Amino acid sequence: MNVIFCHGVMPPEMDWETREYYADNWKHWLQFRIEKDHDVITQIPKFPHAHALLMKYDEWEHIMKFQDINPDTVLIGHSAGGGFVLKYLAMHPKLKIKQAILVAPWIDPDNLQPNGFYNGFDLNNNIIKQTANGIDIMISDDDMPDILASFDKIKQNMPDIRIHAFSGRGHFCTPELPEILDIIKYN
């Protein structure tokens, strides 16, 4: 088994050249927990132009060519990374993975982004069939309106998705995210 974490976009005030990320982001904590507790390889690729106005699907897709994606892979995406996981699976219908976990996924529900990152894919229940253990979404009732609208659109088009609803967790920008450990299917 291996885990690949797909990050979201960075706010404009972050350093684009050095890719400095939030100190309060659970992805490194999760990587440590999974590797230590389960002896599982975890990859955190850095996607280029990780800003909502600059990101390009083909550039992010290119990065995935260098990842070990196979039937034992768990893809975890946060925010724009969660939407990317859905589109990536939809664009590669023969790809089979173990599980996908989307944390506060964003899919540009109103198609307002000028780059069209999420255009050109069909959001439907067939994507779930590419996973041996299904797709899980973690969502909080107080997240940003675009995230909640994305969640509603995903839920409407993918009724078989498993939902893990939280209250007061915002966009899950915290140093740790222990609840995700119970969602990952190791077997």
Image (cartoon, rainbow, N blue to C red):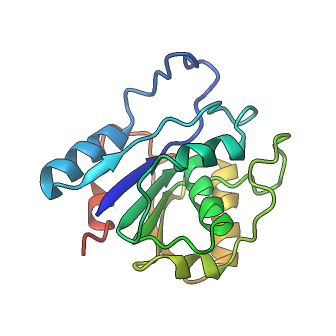
Q: Position of residue 127 (x, y in %)?
A: 60, 75
Instruction: Examine the image and state in which quarter residue 15 appears.
Output: top right
Quarter of the image containing the N terminus?
bottom left
Q: Quadrant of the C terminus?
A: bottom left
Depth check: 79 or 63 in front? Answer: 63
Q: Position of residue 42 (x, y in %)?
A: 31, 49
Q: Is residue 79 visible?
A: no
Say which residue appears at 37% left-offset and 32% top-offset: 24
Q: Is residue 153 above or below residue 158?
A: above
Q: How many numbered marks appear?
A: 0
Q: Position of residue 88 (x, y in %)?
A: 62, 59
32 vs 154, left or right, is left
Q: Residue at x 63, y 81 (%)?
A: 125
Q: Is residue 110 above or below residue 159?
A: above
Left or right of 25 in this view: 182 = left
Query: Dividing the picture into quarters, in which one does residue 49 lie?
Result: top right
Q: What residue appears at the point 45 percent right and 50 percent down from the top-left corner?
A: 67
**Which residue is found at the position 68% from the left and 65% from the top?**
91
Is residue 95 in sight in this rendering? yes
Q: Is residue 90 left or right of residue 64?
A: right
Residue 24 against residue 59 in the figure, above or below: above
153 or 187, which lies in front? 187
Expressed as whole percent of the image width and height from the top left, the position of residue 112 reads 84, 46
